[in-house]
Image (cartoon, helix red, strand yellow):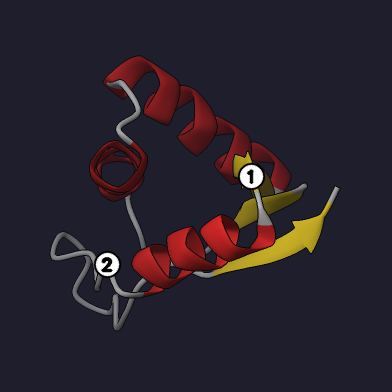
Amino acid sequence: MWQVVLEDDDFHTYQYVIEMLGKIFGYSQEKAFALARIVDANGHVAVYTDSKTLCEDMQTQIHAYGADPRIENSKGSMTAIIEPL
């Protein structure tokens, strides 16, 4: 098993994180908000666990999501890494 870990930064809003997690993973606003709080507080949070291949696919979707239109200096997507459990 592998996991996708979302890394915190200062270039994406809570709303961006909530929307992205909802769109990519189908998470409810409540679950996505809880994950956004964890990444903000801890600097990272595991957002998905599955096979390496599926985690790589989810990582690609995160990296392709794009910049946060609410922040002028947001130049791209958030960073996510995958790691074995």
Q: Residue 2 location in percent, x, y?
A: 74, 52
Q: Write down the quadrant of residue 52 in the picture.
A: bottom right
Q: Is residue 2 left or right of residue 77?
A: right
- Look at 36% across and 65% down and name the residue there: 61
Which residue is under mark 2? 65
Q: Residue 7 location in percent, x, y?
A: 60, 60
Please rate how many residues cluster around mark 2, counting C-alpha atoms within 10 Å: few if below 14, some from 14 to 19, many from 20: some
Q: Write down the quadrant of residue 65 in the picture.
A: bottom left
Q: As displayed, is residue 47 above or below residue 73?
A: above
Report if the CB atoms under discs 1 and 2 are less than 8 Å apart: no
Q: Residue 75 location in percent, x, y?
A: 29, 83
Q: Is residue 23 left or right of residue 52?
A: left
Q: Write down the quadrant of residue 33 in the picture.
A: top left
- Look at 32% across and 79% down and name the residue there: 76
Question: Residue flagged by tag 2: what amino acid is it?
Answer: Tyr
SS state under label 1: strand
- Which mark identifies residue 50? 1
SS state under label 2: loop
- Look at 69% across and 50% down and name the residue there: 3
Hey, which residue is sitting farthest right in the picture? 85
- Look at 78% across and 61% down and name the residue there: 83
